Amino acid sequence: MPPAASLRPHPLLERLRRRWLGPLFDRLGYDLVPAVPDWTHRPLSRRETEALIAAAAARLDADLAACGLSLPGGTGPAVAAFWDLIGGAPVAQRRGGNGFNGALQLYVLMRALQPRVVIESGVFRGLTTWITRQACPEAEILCFDPDLSGLRYRDARARYHARDWWSCDLHGLDLSQGVAFFDDHISQARRVLEARERGLTRLIFDDDAAAHRLHAHGGPAFPTIAMLMDPAGGTEPVRWRRNGREFVYRPDGEEARTARAAIATAHAFDDLHAATGYSPARITYVALAPPASGDPT
């Protein structure tokens, strides 16, 4: 782990924030906080560190088993490796993107899946690209985001595209052993259908919110996997309001029905908050059913 000082705000700026800028923003109704990642706050004593790692590993073992996946020797060694690794992450983000729990889940999932090709849709500052590279050193990574100006980490071997992944010509690339990671605030039903058409069957989704929680998410990727797979969803429209704007989702729409039929397995991982104390994550693993005879792939 790098020296703690390298992860702290500059002392002069921190004094300025506490004495002047913080109170000013508070009066305006805003919070001004340092962009310090959550994993800089951690237990240091061995017993508590080992307890955190063991608790996270137990939940991740159960999650992988529910997906039909596993790691040799269980997830404990992978969680311990991640614990040592995350302190050296080249991206420090507090808001948006993944924190400790989401990054840990992605790391463990990628270790279990060992894809040859990774499609990453939604790159933000580059943390999840870095996590994927640590988990899969030999994988070919293709990163898609309409705006790459916010990158803080650029993988030397990844290919970057400032556009939607669906608009990119991927002919000649074998996706049968690939994994797609979607963190892009685009309809997850649409992403399921796009992935199936290109031969991807192993998918990871971030921000998979249930219908009754959509109002708490900025730009939710509805319909989410949770909404598609809700056994009590029925046909009644789902409506919500956010920032004064009203939204509606109809679960009996053609896109939703077709995507639902394409999913063989969908498992939402434990949010890990109870195990680690860090902010909850919302990672879901999806395995697609093989196409029926005569269906396009």
Image: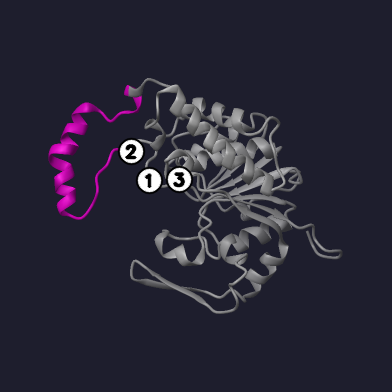
150 horizontally vs 171: left or right: left
Q: Main structural element of the magenta stretch: helix, strand or loop?
A: helix
Mark 3 = which residue? 97
9 horizontally vs 154: left or right: left
Mark 1 and mark 2 in contact? Answer it, CB < 8 Å: yes
- Could you classify mark 3 by the number of other residues whose Cα lies within 10 Å: few (under 14), some (14-19), or many (20 or more)? some
Asked whether residue 15 is drawn in magenta, I would say yes
- Secondary structure state at the residue bearing disc 2: loop
Q: Which amino acid, by three-letter code, is at mark 2? A: Ala
Above/below status of 50 relative to 142: above
Viewer-closest of 289 and 195 = 289
Residue 234 image position (x, y, % from top left): 60, 76
Q: How is the image coloured?
A: one colour
Q: Which residues are magenta?
A: 5-34
Residue 290 image position (x, y, % from top left): 79, 57
Asked whether residue 179 is drawn in magenta, I would say no
Mark 2 = which residue? 35
Residue 241 image position (x, y, % from top left): 39, 71
Q: Which image quadrant for residue 213?
A: bottom left
| Residue at screen point 86% across, 64% down | 293
Mark 1 = which residue? 95
Mark 1 and mark 2: Cα distance apart in space: 8 Å
Quadrant of the image containing the N terminus: top left
